[in-house]
Image (cartoon, rainbow, N blue to C red):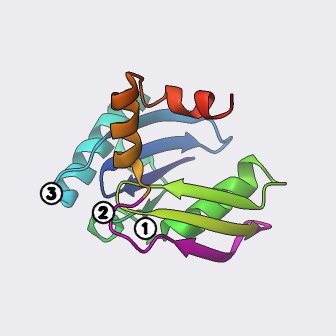
């Protein structure tokens, strides 16, 4: 059995294909463009090629993110907040809080047993989002990936 998850976010698009034992078979990350349907089909084709699979071998597809309604091959659409809650519970069962810094907004989530209990979201356009962090990293002469480790020092 194989499953795919597609996240068409406001700035980045992600897809992952997993097998029935929760092994990642392929993953693709790239920029989101204006044509979500075409993009969804392109990243699917790339992920299938990387996993050496055909679409007929995929048993179920979940779509999430800003552009989730534009994934024509999805069996189901789920909000990114629900996906975050379920993912956190699966990977880190004792964690109760998650922060999502996206391309256009930031969200704080309160989670219990894989369920979203509450969330807050910034109310200023692009305040505290990923693009802001990219600019800060560039200003400091760092790669974006370095900011997380440095923030813990």
Depth check, front residue: 94 or 35: 94
Cα distance in 3D space between marks 1 and 3: 22 Å
- Whether residue 53 is visible: no
Q: Quadrant of the C terminus?
A: top right
Tell me if mark 1 has few (under 14), some (14-19) or many (20+) residues whose alpha carbon lies within 10 angstroms of its own: few
Provide the residue span drawn in magenta: 112-127
Indicate yes or no whether the magenta region holds residue 68: no
Q: Position of residue 48 (x, y in %)?
A: 36, 37
Q: Is residue 10 above or below residue 135?
A: below
Q: Which residue is mark 1?
A: 75
| Image quarter of residue 67 | bottom left
Q: Earlier in the sequence, mark 1 or mark 3?
A: 3
Q: Which residue is mark 2?
A: 71
**Decide: marks 3, 2 in contact (CB < 8 A)?**
no
In the rendered image, residue 126 lying in the magenta stretch gets the answer: yes
Residue density around tag 2, few if under 14, some if 14–19, many if 20 or more, within 10 Å: many
Q: CA distance from mark 1 to mark 2?
A: 9 Å
Residue 109 picture quarter: bottom right
Q: Nearer the viewer, mark 1 or mark 3?
A: 3
Q: Which mark is residue 34?
A: 3
Of helix, strand and loop, which one carries label 1?
Answer: loop
Q: Where does the image place residue 63, in percent across and percent down from the top left?
A: 42, 62
The label number, if any, that marks residue 28 in the structure image: none
Residue occupying the point 45% across, 49% down: 58
Q: Relative to 60, say whether 48 is above or below.
A: above
Q: Secondary structure at mark 3?
A: loop
Q: Is residue 34 left or right of residue 27?
A: left
Image point (77%, 48%), residue name: 92
Q: Residue furthest front?
A: 140
């Amino acid at each position: 059995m194989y499953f795919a998850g597609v996240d068409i976010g406001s700035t980045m698009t992600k897809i992952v294909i997993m097998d029935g034992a929760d092994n990642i078979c392929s993953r693709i990350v790239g920029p989101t463009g204006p044509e979500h349907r075409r993009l969804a089909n392109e990243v699917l084709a790339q992920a299938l090629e990387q996993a050496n699979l055909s679409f007929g071998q995929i048993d179920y597809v979940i779509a999430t993110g800003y552009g989730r309604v534009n994934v024509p091959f999805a069996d189901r659409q789920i909000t990114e907040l629900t996906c975050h809650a379920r993912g956190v519970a699966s990977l880190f069962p004792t964690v109760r809080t998650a922060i999502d810094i996206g391309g256009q907004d930031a969200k704080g989530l309160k989670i219990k047993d894989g369920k979203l209990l509450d969330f807050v979201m910034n109310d200023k356009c692009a305040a505290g989002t990923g693009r802001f962090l990219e600019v800060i990293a560039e200003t400091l002469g760092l790669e974006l990936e370095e900011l997380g480790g440095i923030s813990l020092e």
